[in-house]
Every structure is written in structure tokens, then in C-alpha cells.
Amino acid sequence: MATQTQERRLAFLATALPPIAWVVVFFLAPLAIVWAYSFGQNASLTEVDISGTFANYARALEPLYLGIFAKSIFVAGITTLLCLIIGFPVALAIVFASERWRPWMLLLIMLPFWTNLLIRTYALIAVLRTEGYANFTLEWLWDRASWLMTLVGLQPLGDFTPLQLLYNNFAVVVGLVYVHLPFMVLPLYAALDRLDKSLIEASLDLGAGHLRTLFSIVVPLALPGIISGIIITFVPALGAYLTPDLLGGPDSQMIANVIERQFKKANDWPFGAALSFLLMYATFAAIALRAYLSRGKPPEGHGI
Amino acid sequence: MAQRRAPLEYNRMWQIRIWLFAVFFFLYAPLVALIAFSFNDSKRNIVWRGFTLDYYRKLFNNQDLLIAFANSLTIALFATLIALVVGALAAVLLWRYRFAGKVAVEGAFTLPLVVPEICMGVSMLLFFTRVAPWPNNLIWPLSLGSIIIAHVSFCFPFVALVVGARLASFNKEQEEAARDLGANDWQAFRDVLLPHIRPALIAGGLLAFTLSLDDFVITFFTSGPDTITFPVKVYSMLRFSVTPEVNAASTMLILLTIVLMAIMMVMQSRAQKAKG
């Protein structure tokens, strides 16, 4: 039956070729070019000579850029930690919510995730700027406090000076937590949902308190999911561009902002390419770490 | 005596309730304020001065913004259609066949999910300026080609994920039965497999559409002066000034996203009902 094997072969090729060709030409090839550029140097305004030099990587290791890398890792780390602290009780509440409420709570967590990143960042600008809602609320509280002081016969508080909440590192961390919280809650939810609840009941029955149960039963059992959540949050936070760009000040640049500048204003594409690949290596290291830590365990599905 | 509750009813603990309320307030208050102040009759975004639709009127007279919106919808439509074909084929390929280098191919298909957006953005910039320059004098929908290609590259893995999950529940005997009854490969695919994965195609398509519509970073690197998309336009607007017009534009996009999500969820629940 030569024709049938031929037909099978044709079906395989028709299935395999389009996606493989697409990913090679329109994804891997562009990345390979960036990689090649990272070993090049500017020959003229628009030409790059790929000479195999390591100068770009050497420059990336200068204290200035190492500092920005360290800072990006630090900011992404703080963001991840805050997301974990804020998100864990939320995930726990969703797991133990009634059948009726659970889908709605999941929807409420996911809805901002589907809302445009730019719009969410813009919404935060309106909250944090000096004449924004946060300062507005603080001023109102300040005035009430001042009024209370005079009521009990004390000197009123002075004029309210708006806090500088925007265009600094604080704003960047708030923005990153705001944007990445769903990335943490969903894997945590997936892990906690699979937990055998009778173990928690047993622990409580045997006299452990809620906190002790949490730290000696729930956390160890949900550890793979917690690690997943940490990596899934950390990786996009590390490469964040828009949040530090719009909410940050001159000293809160992250690595993605430096890369963008090399490709636009500074016009040093080889150096930008080297920084891009260093960011990629850092990302892959984080993902490899996750695979290493969860080895031997069944793959888990996330509801994203 | 304290109110009695079962040990695992964490949701009835007041600490958890306050925590949940605070988190959802943190997530939604900025968005609600943004939407509310798009109807505010004042340039300043902070004090409520009365209801107006002025900024929506301005929006519909803002030629640049309308063009950007049309560009975004066109890009999302074409990117979704191509991503559906590429993503579905990728899922079928990994599900049905064993072949040399399968692990590498699988890795390549998931790579766009993990590569940082900025890296993908600069790779597309390099590709479309230095290696395969996209002609810049093409007529309208074709001029968006480079952005469409970039969007397909990050959307199709999501389609492949959704379709792959659906394929896992497919009973291969159905397809064999079709063949026994005389269908060829193509007929078996069209009449048996395709109907089975249709809900996943719809869900994956809506997912791709939303992702494409929302993308800023990658588009920022591939769009030229004549190919501005909606998020890129909003970005430049809010770089200059924060006006209620930006709020109105954002509200429209949020609304569109919610509608798309609602359709996606209805489709999913319908598919689940059909299955169960």
C-alpha cells in the first residue's frame, strides 16, 4: 500500500511544516540575529560589523550595568515576595470558598490580568501622583486628624504636604505587584486545590493552631506550587519594561529600559543585543531552577 | 460563646475577609476610578464635577486615535486567524506524531511563552529593519504585515496550549472508525477531529485576539509612524498629558476586553456541558 504510506507522509508534512517553519523563520531566526549582533560592533550609523568581539559583554559587566542588573533582580525579588505574602491568603480563601463563589473569585483575580497592561499602569498613575487619589485621601485624613487635635485642645497639624508617591522605586514596586498578583495567585490556587484537606483537619484536630498548621502542613505540601508561583511571577517582573518606564524615576530603571534605550536613543544595537541575551540567560536560569526543584513531580496545569 | 464554624471555613474568618476586601480594592479601585472619571466634566481628574460624555465625543472626532483603533483590530483579526492555523497544527503535530527531534520542536513552540517581551521586541525590530525589511510603501492592511507576523509569533503558543489540552480528551478510536468507514486523512480530520477541537479553537482564538489587542511592548518596537496601534497611541498620549480623553479611550478598550472574555467563558461552559 505505497499510496497510503505516501498519503500519511504528506499528512505529516502538512501538519509539521507550517508551525515549524513559522517558529524557525519568525521567532528563532530573529533571536539568532540578536545573538549574532551581541558579538558585533557599530561600523557606521546603520551598519554593524559582526566581528566576534566580547566587548559588549565586557561592557555589560561594568559596575554601572551590573548595578542595574542587581537592582532589577532586587526589585523583581521584592515584587515576588510581596505577591506571595498578599496572594497566599487570597489563594487559600478561593480554595475554601463555596462552589458558588469560587468561579467568581477566580474571575475577579483574572479580570485585571486580561485588562491592558498600559491601562492598568495608567490607572495607577492617577492614584499615585501628587494630586492623585492616594494623596487626596491622605490629605482628608490629615485634616480630620488636625481637627481632632484642636478639639482636644492641641495645636493643629501644619499644612498637608503631598507625598511623592510617583516616579520612584516605591511606585515601580507597587506597579509590579499590581500587575503580577494574578501570576502568583493562580499557581498557588492550583497547588492548594490539590491538597488533601483531611490532612489539615487532622492537624487541627490534633491540637495544632491555624498558624502552625499553615507552616508545618500546608506550606510544605504546597511547596512545588509555591515555587512555580515564585518563578512565574519573578520572570516577567525581571523583564518588565512599561512599569518602570511610566512609574519610575530617573534612578529606577530596570534592565529592559536600558535595553530599549540602546535600540532607540543610544543607537548601540550590539550592546543592546548583549544585554538582551544576558536577560534571556537570567530568565532561562530561573526556569531551569523551577524544573530542577520540581523534578520527578507530575507536571501541573495552570488555569491561565 | 464564639460563633461556631467548621475548621476549614477560612472565608468566615474576619482576618481573611478583610484581607480579601483589601486585595480586591487594591486591584479594582484604580480601574473603577479610571472609568468613572472618563465621565467627569472637568479637566482635572480628581474632583467630581458632573456627568458628561464630552470626552467620548472628542474621542470619536480624534482621527489619529480612530485609525490606531482600526489598526489594532485589523492586526488582531489577522494575527488571530494565522495563529489559529499555526497553533492548531503545532498542537496536532505534538499530539499525534512521534518523530526525531520532537523534544526540540516542543521546546521551540513553548519558547515564545518564556522569552521576555523586551527581547522578543528587539529581535523583531532587528529582523524587520536589518534582515528582512518590511516595505514601507505598501497599501494599508499589508503595511501592518510586520506587526501581524510579530503578534502571531507570541500568540500561537497560547493557541497550541489550549488546543493541546482539548486534544488530550479526544478518543482516537473515533478517527480510526472514520478511516475504517472509508474516510481519508483529510476527511477524518475535517469531520471528526475538527469538530472535537472547535471549542478550543474558539477559546484559543479569543485568547489570541485579546493578547494581540493588548500588546504594547512588542508592537512598540515593530510599529512605524504610519502603523500606530491603539496601545502605542495611548502610550504617546499619556506621555504628553493625562486627560480624561485617555480615560475614555481606556474605558472603551476595557469594555471590549470584558465582552471578549464573556464570550470566551460562555463558549467554554457550553463546551463543558456538551462534554459532560
Image: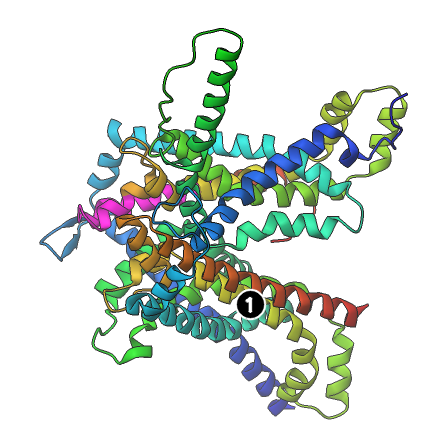
Q: Which residues are magenta?
A: A259-285
Residue A170 location in percent, x, y?
Answer: 41, 29
> Is residue A270 magenta-colored?
yes
Please tell me how crowded label 1 is: few (under 14), some (14-19), or many (20+) other residues with Cα within 10 Å: many
Q: Nearer the viewer, residue B97 or B36?
A: B36
Residue A21 location in percent, x, y?
Answer: 43, 71
Q: Nearer the viewer, residue B52 or B100?
A: B52
Residue at 60 percent across and 91 percent down: it is: A3
> Is residue A205 magenta-colored?
no
Residue at 44 percent across and 37 percent down: it is: A133
Residue at 79 percent across and 51 percent down: it is: A100
Residue A197 location in percent, x, y?
Answer: 83, 37
Residue at 82 percent across and 39 percent down: it is: A196
| Residue type beneath disc 1 | Leu
Q: Could you say which quadrant of the image residue A221 lies in? A: top right
| Residue with the mark numbered 1 | B206
Does B145 appear above or below A74? below
